[in-house]
Amino acid sequence: MTEGPTITTIAQRAGVSIASVSRVLNGLPTRPETERRVLQAAGELGYVPNSVARSLKSRRSNQVGFAIADIGNPAYLAMIREIQPLLKAAGYRLVLHSTGSDIAEEIEVLRGLGERYADGLIMVPLRMTEEHLKMFHAARAPIVIIGAAPDGAPVDNVRTDSRTGVRLALAHLHALGRRRIGFLNGPPDTVPGAARAAGWAEASRALGLPAGPELTEVGDFYRADGAAAAGRLLDRVPDLDALVCANDLIALGALDVLRRRGRRVPDDVAVTGMDDTDLATLAWPALTSVSLGSAERGRAAAGLLLDRLAGDGQGPRVVTVEPRLVVRGSTAGQETP
Amino acid sequence: MTEGPTITTIAQRAGVSIASVSRVLNGLPTRPETERRVLQAAGELGYVPNSVARSLKSRRSNQVGFAIADIGNPAYLAMIREIQPLLKAAGYRLVLHSTGSDIAEEIEVLRGLGERYADGLIMVPLRMTEEHLKMFHAARAPIVIIGAAPDGAPVDNVRTDSRTGVRLALAHLHALGRRRIGFLNGPPDTVPGAARAAGWAEASRALGLPAGPELTEVGDFYRADGAAAAGRLLDRVPDLDALVCANDLIALGALDVLRRRGRRVPDDVAVTGMDDTDLATLAWPALTSVSLGSAERGRAAAGLLLDRLAGDGQGPRVVTVEPRLVVRGSTAGQETP
């Protein structure tokens, strides 16, 4: 194990006194230029805030923030259900931030860490900007990102692999004999939207399926968007025999439209969702869905953060949760041999 | 408008100095006997903490707690969706407590208010104990109860009327010609369970329907409990032609069992839920459900609390949201004239 960055190495790199580093990392008033240099040096050295927050006992809030895009999406609920009891058992309250995936709001949450309203933060950003990265470096409390954190960011990271997830769905439909398969994606400028689009293109190619833009429709990650996108795609490609949807909410919207148009699921059109939320078993027919391990990711994120809060000072860690396909009625039937 | 209780009137009633009252209400150390007398006097006078929290600017947390039984129940989600943006606009973060309706945990949350982790609390307790009431009196921050708060409790209160809600469901099924109507309730020792049982008994009598215990099954307010209860009831009363369910999760469990047993909904058995959650439109057939105005109650609770946080010092207020029936496929069909 290599020695992590210390106040001394940060002071050397920043060309400031140890006292100045300590003041900045403790959130005390400092000249802006000093603060900038300390934070930059800390970032370059891969310093992860941890024991600092821990040692400042008097300033502990006993709270952890959880910032998600949409409280109405049960994929996040599955995470909350795991994260909350783990935090509670360790003496932390959960502060919920539903940001609507608005970047400015996410930055505001990150900035709030500076006021020490929370001893740590778990965040699920859908987009990753320069501003996020800057705030990660400036943060004075440990952060765990669920989703893809940029290389070198001073945060712990829980990932899944939704590219592979899309491949699992497509390979399943292909094995069932489906050949006119449409794709309903979320916004391609989000991290999950981009990953799913890449997975779609790769897997289509590998299976010898067409993957032209005429088979894809995009909308937001909500049910109404899924319905609208499914409607547009069915208008354009009426002979579709399957739909791969980028999350369960989109798939539910697609089921609504297929039912309204009298298309039988799965006989006429097979449908897959993604996230394997509680909604998948509520839908009728029940939805085949790619599990991205929401519960497992929640548990992993809580574990990583609690390690930091207990003083773990090692460099950024990455945990990856593998996707798996859960087959239900919306695609059920025998796979062709 | 009558003058509310003041530090002076509390001091007179408690037989202690004004300084002592101030110390207690400001959360400063005091002799236990003094504290007890002040809190008792404050309770008897109907004192509602508000401007105290407000004036202690240095100790404001800019947070509001929200304590619910089950983060997985979308009725609470509907509340969170309304409460969070209202609080955020006023500069407050939402701290979530999912208590599993455990009384000890709820008391712990109330006790936490004493540490000033939050400037106020919205709580949805399923049971109301002496201990709750004591903590309401001792609380040093305003509390809003969604559900039935005891008379004289120093809290604001948002109520609905689930007795009437059950009546609406039963009258609808009766008008559809159903006469063998079963009732799947939650635990009768909870406030909502008791209210629904009373509504069931009253409405059955008024409609001339049988309401004996053989037509009722109880379980917890979760889907699996609903399925188990529906199974037991159908075993005992195989010729049921309708089921009134005490919430949507129970109704979804009932739909699962009816589908497994090959009973058509609504042709053989009509089903009603309660809470009119997002799940009602996901179910197949879509679920007729009694709306108890979750969104409206969330908005009202946030409004009441924000009034307090802005310094409103009037006595406890009650807002009541009326239930209404939302008819969908699980009972659809013509009502008999």
Image: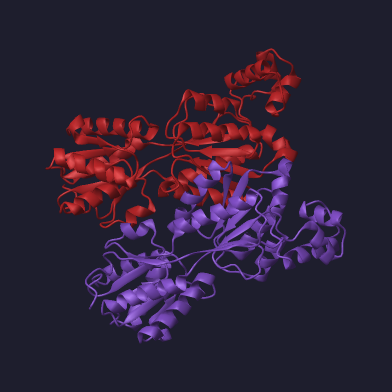
Chain colours: A red, B purple
Question: With respect to residue B321, does B214 lie above or below?
Answer: below
- Where's the C terminus of chain B, which quadrant? bottom left
Q: Is residue A232 above or below residue B26?
A: above
Question: Given the current orientation, which residue lies at the most extreme left position?
Answer: A239
Residue in view at x 27 percent, y 74 percent: B269
Figure disc tally: 0
- Image quadrant for the N terminus of chain B? bottom right
Q: Is residue A266 among the parts visible in the rendering? A: no
Work out whether residue B67 or residue B34 is closer to the camera in this orientation and state it.
B34
- Residue A260 picture location, percent across and down: 19, 53
Can you tell which quarter of the image residue A328 is in? bottom left
| Residue B199 visible here | yes
Residue sitting at 64 percent across and 25 percent down? A4
Q: Position of residue B200 (x, y in %)?
A: 42, 79
Q: Is A111 in front, or is B88? A: B88
Closest to the observer, A151 or B226: B226
The x, y position of residue A211, in whole percent, is 20, 32
Quick check: A194 left or right of B109? left
Place of residue B172 in the rendered image (x, y in percent of width and height, measured from the top left): 32, 74
Q: Residue at x 16, y 47 (%)?
A: A336
Name the residue furthest top. A15
Q: Is residue B100 above or below residue B118?
A: below
**Splitting the image into 4 quarters, where does residue B228 fall?**
bottom left
